[in-house]
Structure formats: C-alpha cells, structure tokens
C-alpha cells in the first residue's frame, strides 16, 4: 500500500518536470486509481497561453487514455499549496465526485484534504444530460 508521503514525493517529482516558462509556477499531480495504478502529471504551458494544460488534467487524460476511469485520490503539489482550478475540478468530477483531493506545499505539508464534491458544490455530472 502506497503511503501519503510516497505520493507527495511523486507529486513533487512530477512538478519538477513542469514546462512553465511563462508563469514559472510548477504544479505536479499524482492521480491514484481504485486499482492502485498511479498516473502523474505536470503543467505544460504554451506560447499560445490558453493552449496550456494543468497538471491535474495531464494526469487525468493519461489515465483515461490508458483505459482507467475509477479514481481514489489525487495529490497536488505546488510551492504554496495551491488548489486545483475550476476546469480541473470539473474534469475530475466527471469520473470521481468523491475523489479525495490533497493539496500539498513545498514543505510537504497537506494544506487541504477534502472530497472533490466539497470543492465543487453541485458539480455538473453526466447524469444531468439524460434527466
Ligand atoms: N495550474 C495547474 O497546473 N493546476 C491548477 O489547478 C492551477 C494552475 C498551472 C497552469 C499554469 O501552467 C500555471 O499553473 C499558472 O496558472
């Protein structure tokens, strides 16, 4: 069983791979699947600014494109314990409204530990499309 400390270390390593020449804000994420598989991601910026992608969505699209859709937890590392943006919350909500979201700072402190549905109240879900 992987420990929170190991996940924090993996998220920090992912942040070190961030391509963030514009914001200089490095973000690393580790998404843990229900079957234990882990997918890491970093933010990848672009000279055409809106084309960039966040660390959390990098991890999510890696997982989904490998056939994994059930998730337990995500650990997000930033130097100041920053929180996932609204687009990332919504993208994650599609697959895992109960996802445990840990935000961690450069000291390795968990500054927030909440369920995704608490971070995205009344999030829009696929079920709403067929009601
Ligand atoms: N960023 C993330 O990777 N995740 C978030 O949830 C917040 C923002 C990235 C996007 C951009 O590369 C940089 O942080 C500054 O916004």
Image (cartoon, grey):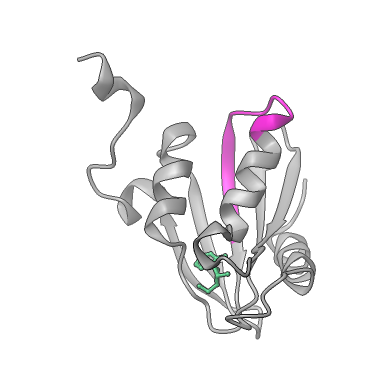
In front here: 35 or 58?
Answer: 58
Quarter occupied by the N terminus: top right
Asked which quadrant contains residue 51, the reply is bottom right
Depicted 77 relative to depicted 99: above or below: below
The residue shown at (61%, 43%) is 60
Residue at x 70%, y 66% (from the top left corner): 8
Q: Position of residue 95 (x, y in %)?
A: 48, 32
Residue 13 place in picture, x, y as percent: 80, 69
Name the quarter where the C terminus is drawn: top left
Residue 70 drawn in magenta: yes
x then y, percent, for residue 58: 64, 50
Horizontally, residue 93 falls left or right of residue 40, namely left
Q: Is residue 24 above or below residue 1?
A: below
Give the magenta-colored segment's residue range: 64-75
In the image, residue 113 lies at what x, y percent?
Answer: 46, 62
Inspect the magenta stretch and tell me whether residue 56 lies in it.
no
């Amino acid at each position: 069983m992987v420990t929170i400390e190991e996940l924090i270390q993996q998220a920090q390593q992912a942040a070190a791979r961030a391509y963030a020449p514009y914001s200089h804000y490095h973000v690393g994420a580790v998404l843990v699947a229900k079957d234990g598989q882990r997918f890491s991601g970093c933010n990848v910026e672009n000279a055409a600014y809106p084309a960039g992608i966040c660390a959390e969505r990098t991890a999510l699209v890696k997982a989904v494109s490998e056939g994994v859709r059930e998730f337990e937890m995500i650990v997000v590392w930033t130097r100041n314990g920053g929180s996932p943006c609204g687009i990332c919350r919504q993208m994650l909500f599609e697959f895992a409204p109960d996802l445990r979201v840990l935000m961690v700072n450069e000291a390795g402190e968990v500054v927030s530990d909440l369920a995704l549905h608490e971070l995205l109240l009344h999030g829009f879900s696929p079920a709403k499309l067929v009601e």
